[in-house]
């Protein structure tokens, strides 16, 4: 039986980028998925409905940084599925962000990144957690980033927000664990999502340059593989495990640097 059979999920930022792959993965494991995004997820919802049935998916336009919008989204998911078992906080500002020196980041942009990347997950939890607490069960997966472990230059707003996600996850896991709610961070490495390739070739160039430097340094240090960019879908196995009822550990951070074989 599919591991998420009978479960209902909200996935933010699911209409584009890596989120599209998470939506397909959740549906493939039997979950009913609410795809929430500022972009229209209807087309993806139709694709998933064609494969897994009309009852397997819904989509909603929602801005995670706006509390009114979040409340409406949660109400729509409850109306459609009757419950929420899994919350994936994936929506973030990443692909559209240009690399910028810390001395030149605009204050308003800093606030916007924090509003989407940190207030967004907080607002989602604020309005989803009461439903999970009431049923004594829930899985919350916060999408972090390997950049928060490594630190990279010229993306201070983004990297800081993803560092916040790690602390957010830890504190939340302690607070919600007693209610049967598991909270985890999944931290992908650099991933060539459709949005990154379409909206920000600069990220791709920088990652390529960094990889060449890392590879040269790794070869000098010892002959062995170095981290490389992955394609969306990598980490899918771990992602499903985190959403799965059998995931037993309360809280953990996963750093995914390299694609798993065959994905
Ligand atoms: N691509 C990478 O290399 C990479 C690496 C590590 C972590 N991540 C993380 O993975 C997640 C997805 O990355 P991606 O490459 O697909 O990035 P992305 O920027 O292309 O996708 C983010 C998604 O969030 C949506 N979104 C943006 N603002 C929103 C808002 N206010 N409300 C609702 N939805 C909103 C976008 O429309 C998009 O669908 C993000 O959390 C990102 O930080 C990405």
Image (tube, rainbow, N blue to C red):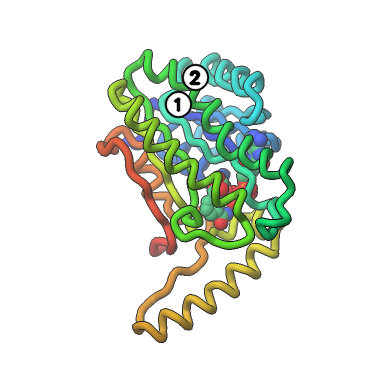
Quadrant location of the C terminus? bottom left
> Is 96 in front, or is 195?
96
Q: Are marks 2 and 1 in contact (CB under 8 Å)?
A: yes
Question: Which residue occupies 64% across, 30% down?
Answer: 65
What residue did someone put label 1 on?
8
Q: CA distance from mark 2 to mark 1?
A: 6 Å
- Is the residue 31 above or below the residue 197 in the image? above
User: Disc 2, ligand 1: is the CB inside 8 Å?
Assistant: no
Q: Tell me, yes or no, if residue 17 can be seen here.
A: no
Relative to residue 221, is residue 47 drawn left or right? right
Q: Please provide percent x and percent y for residue 105.
A: 71, 52
**Dot 2: element:** helix
Q: Please provide percent x and percent y for residue 169.
A: 41, 37
Q: Please provide percent x and percent y for residue 229.
A: 52, 65
- For residue 34, what is the image quadrant? top right
Quadrant location of the N terminus? top left
Q: First in sequence: mark 2 or mark 1?
A: 1
Relative to residue 13, is residue 214 drawn left or right? left
- Is the residue 198 above or below the residue 61 in the image? below
* Ligand 1's quadrant: top right
**Dot 1: element:** strand
Question: Could you say which disc has been placed on residue 81 in the image?
Answer: 2
Residue at the outermost bottom position: 220
């Amino acid at each position: 039986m599919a591991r998420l059979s009978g479960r209902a999920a909200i996935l933010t930022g699911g209409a584009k980028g890596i989120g599209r792959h998470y939506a397909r993965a959740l549906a493939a494991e039997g979950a009913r998925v609410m795809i929430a995004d500022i972009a229209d997820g209807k087309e993806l919802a139709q694709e998933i409905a064609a494969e897994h049935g009309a009852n397997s998916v819904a989509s909603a336009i929602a801005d995670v940084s706006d509390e009114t919008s979040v409340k409406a989204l949660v109400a729509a998911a409850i109306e459609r599925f009757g419950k929420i078992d899994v919350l994936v906080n994936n929506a973030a500002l990443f692909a559209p962000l240009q690399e910028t020196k810390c001395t030149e980041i605009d204050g308003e942009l800093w606030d916007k990144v924090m509003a989407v990347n940190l207030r967004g997950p907080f607002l989602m939890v604020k309005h989803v957690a009461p439903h999970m607490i009431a049923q004594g069960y829930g899985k919350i997966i916060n999408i972090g980033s390997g950049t928060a472990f490594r630190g990279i230059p010229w993306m201070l707003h983004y990297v800081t927000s993803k560092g916040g996600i790690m602390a957010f996850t830890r504190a939340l896991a302690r607070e919600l664990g007693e209610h049967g709610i598991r909270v985890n961070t999944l931290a992908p490495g650099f991933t060539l999502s459709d949005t990154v390739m379409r909206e920000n070739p600069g990220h791709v160039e920088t990652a390529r340059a960094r990889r060449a430097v890392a590879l040269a340094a790794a070869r000098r240090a010892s002959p062995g593989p170095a981290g490389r960019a992955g394609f969306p879908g990598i980490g899918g196995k771990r992602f499903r495990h985190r959403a799965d009822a059998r995931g037993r550990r309360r809280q953990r951070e996963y750093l995914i640097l390299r694609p798993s074989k065959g994905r």
